[in-house]
Image (spheres, grey):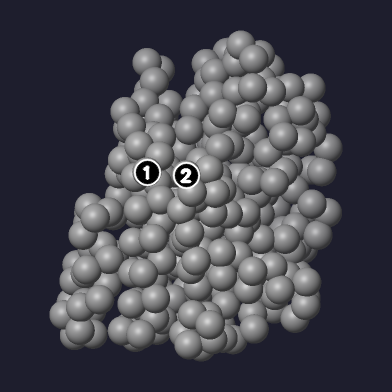
């Protein structure tokens, strides 16, 4: 059977997984979502509604997509898109190994830089491709998942043209020969996830304030210095090269605002996925973002004080279980 005729499995249907899977299903692809019972009940009760910062909207009835918490839904999958949190990658790899066909393409659409290696380690002999999702999706309840920022998904180039095969209207995917460097570039940008989560301020309003941008710039500069010591040259997920981003973030509000408007679209209510994790009382991915920077710093004898401070604050917020602590820039800097 042609790969296009076989279902696309979504391994871990949270906000990103539901949005990506829903957009593929809206384009006529067969999609199977492996999800928690809470998500399944929500979609079965309301259908799936996909909205975007650009005013776009797609609606699917619950019967237009396969929903289950039973991984046997992957038994005939041609492609499996992994969208779980980084801490759950190993467990999901074992589920895929036990259910997805040997010839199924496995594509990681996860944050962080270690997931592809872990998937390959636990799925020997299988085709595993890296990917990068540049945009945010927020689960708004009642089956609605809202894409709040712009950008095209990037997938590691392969001879079968997987990126092109998965690209559908409203969900562009493009191939890259530098997925490792792209993922490192996304990690550097994603250092703002924690700042946004700690601030309890919508992303666009946060980036409109120079004090927050300076904090983000300092965090990026620290991260870039640490990964440079590791010999890593990141590729930016935006049109702006990584090395230029810290000085641009420090520009006056009016100049930065004009620049941002030309390079990225952000919904007024956009928040980071880490903010949503704190709100829902879930474990965050801080160990796979700032935690990666501090691990390298430890290995290289570097300090990285801002990254360490932010890891500490996020873990305090996790332990408190009260959502975002709503900290100021000064409180984060300590």
Question: Which residue is drawn at the image coordinates 53% and 82% (left, top)?
Answer: 334
| Count of labels in the image | 2
> Do labels 2 and 1 touch, CB within 8 Å?
yes
The x, y position of residue 177, in whole percent, is 31, 28
Judge by depth and name the residue closer to the eye, 121 or 25.
Answer: 121
Mark on residue 229?
1
Q: Is residue 140 visible?
A: no
Q: Is residue 331 above or below residue 111?
A: below
The x, y position of residue 277, in whole percent, is 67, 66
Question: Which residue is drawn at the image coordinates 36% and 26% (left, top)?
Answer: 157
Q: Is residue 90 visible?
A: yes
SS under mark 2: helix
Quadrant in which the N terminus appears: top right
Q: Is residue 290 above or below residue 169?
A: below
In this rendering, position of residue 138 left or right of residue 158: right
Question: Which residue is drawn at the image coordinates 76% and 36% (left, top)?
Answer: 91
In this rendering, position of residue 257 left or right of residue 201: left
Residue furthest to the front? 301
Judge by depth and name the residue closer to the eye, 307 or 76.
Answer: 307
Compute the Cα span from label 2 to label 1: 7 Å
Please name the residue that numbered disc 2 is placed on: 300
SS under mark 1: helix
Mark on residue 191?
none
The x, y position of residue 87, in whole percent, is 70, 46
Question: Which residue is drawn at the image coordinates 24% and 55% (left, top)?
Answer: 243
> Counting other residues with Cα less than 10 Å from the Cα at mark 1, is it few (<14), some (14-19), or many (20 or more)?
few
> Counting other residues with Cα less than 10 Å from the Cα at mark 2, is it few (<14), some (14-19), or many (20 or more)?
few
């Amino acid at each position: 059977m042609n790969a296009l005729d076989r279902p696309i499995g979504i391994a871990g249907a949270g906000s990103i997984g539901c949005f990506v899977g829903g957009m593929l299903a809206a384009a006529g692809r067969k999609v199977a979502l492996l999800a928690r019972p809470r998500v399944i009940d929500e979609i079965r009760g309301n259908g799936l509604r996909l909205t975007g910062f650009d005013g776009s909207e797609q609606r699917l009835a619950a019967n237009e997509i396969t929903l289950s918490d039973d991984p046997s839904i992957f038994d005939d999958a041609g492609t499996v898109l992994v969208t779980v949190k980084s801490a759950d990658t190993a467990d999901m790899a074992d589920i895929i190994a036990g259910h997805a066909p040997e010839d199924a393409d496995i594509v990681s659409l996860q944050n962080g830089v270690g997931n592809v290696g872990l998937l390959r380690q636990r799925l020997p002999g299988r085709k595993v491709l890296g990917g990068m999702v540049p945009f945010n999706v927020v689960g708004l309840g009642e089956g609605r998942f809202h894409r709040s920022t712009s950008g095209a998904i990037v997938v590691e180039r392969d001879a079968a043209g997987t990126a092109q095969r998965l690209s559908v209207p409203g969900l562009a995917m493009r191939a890259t020969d530098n997925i490792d460097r792209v993922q490192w570039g996304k990690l550097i940008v994603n250092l703002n996830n924690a700042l946004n989560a700690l601030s309890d301020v919508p992303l666009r309003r946060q980036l409109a304030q120079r004090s927050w941008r300076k904090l983000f710039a300092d965090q990026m500069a620290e991260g870039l210095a640490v990964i440079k010591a590791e010999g890593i040259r990141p590729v930016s997920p935006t049109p702006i090269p990584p090395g230029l981003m810290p000085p641009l973030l420090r520009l006056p509000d009016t100049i930065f605002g004009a620049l941002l408007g030309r390079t990225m679209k952000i919904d007024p209510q956009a928040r980071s996925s880490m903010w949503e994790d704190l709100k829902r009382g879930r474990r965050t991915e801080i160990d796979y973002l700032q935690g990666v920077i501090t691990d390298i710093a430890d290995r290289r004898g570097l300090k990285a004080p801002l990254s360490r401070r932010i890891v500490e604050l996020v873990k305090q917020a996790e332990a408190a279980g009260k959502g975002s602590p709503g900290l100021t820039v000064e409180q984060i800097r300590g």
